Image (spheres, grey):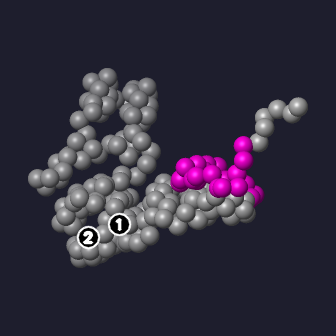
Amino acid sequence: MSVRDVLEKHRKGEIDASEAERLLRLDYVRTIGEHTLFDTRRAERKGVPEIIYGESKSADTIADIIEGVMAERDVLLISRASPQQYERVRARIPDARYEDSARMIVLDRRRERETTGLIGLLAAGSSDIAAAEEARVVAQAMGCRVMAAYDVGIAAFHRFIGPLHDMLEEGVDAWWSWRAWRAPSPPWYRRWPTSRS
């Protein structure tokens, strides 16, 4: 139950102040195995599906977390997961899938998916694709449609114009750009004067 739900129930008189206080207390930590303290309400507070950082965890620990978390929810993402971790996890959790380019394990057991919004993803160079793909997987898990354009670095501005135009034509609601703003200025770039003489 979200904070809003609790407050609404209290406003309607369905629960008293003591029950509302009990439900709103930040004691939403659940122990999974002997290795994980899991915040069961973070997804509701943040509006983003839970993402578990997988890079430094064993496949067994990841599988334990998935089994513990998925008992109560229908979407879970594991970031920075290797194909080897995924294969071992899949042996215990057959409906897990792997997004290779994003290096993510995805559990999505929703029967229906409501989609809202359109996000435009722009990645400057081919080395930025993994980060962009991770953002794509998260956005899709949040219910957003995604338009993506990769290797559109600012050093070759002409590569950026077409994808940007397409995204504007489609009515993109939000943008995610990776490293385009950090790209060094090309050698032919000159600072134009700001005033005319």
* Residue 150 percent across, percent down from the top left: 58, 65
| Quarter the N terminus occupies | top left
Disc on res. 16: none
What residue sits 41% from the left and 72% below the top?
A: 100
What residue sits 72% from the left and 62% below the top?
A: 158
Q: Secondary structure at mark 1?
A: strand
Q: Residues within 10 Å of mark 2 (few under 14, many from 20)?
A: many
Q: Image quadrant of residue 28?
A: top left
Q: Are marks 2 and 1 in contact (CB under 8 Å)?
A: yes
The residue where tag 1 is placed is 105
- Against 155, residue 18 (above or below) is above
What residue sits 37% from the left and 72% below the top?
A: 97
* 158 relative to 115 in the view: left or right: right
Q: Residues within 10 Å of mark 1 (few under 14, many from 20)?
A: many
Residue 115 visible in the displayed image: no
Magenta stretch, residue numbers: 164-191
The verdict on residue 172 being magenta is yes
* 49 relative to 34 in the view: left or right: right
| Quarter the C terminus occupies | top right
Looking at this rendering, what residue extends furthest in the left direction?
Answer: 34
Q: Secondary structure at mark 2?
A: helix
* Residue 99 percent across, percent down from the top left: 41, 70
* Residue 127 percent across, percent down from the top left: 48, 65
The residue where tag 2 is placed is 85
Looking at this rendering, what residue extends furthest in the right direction?
Answer: 197
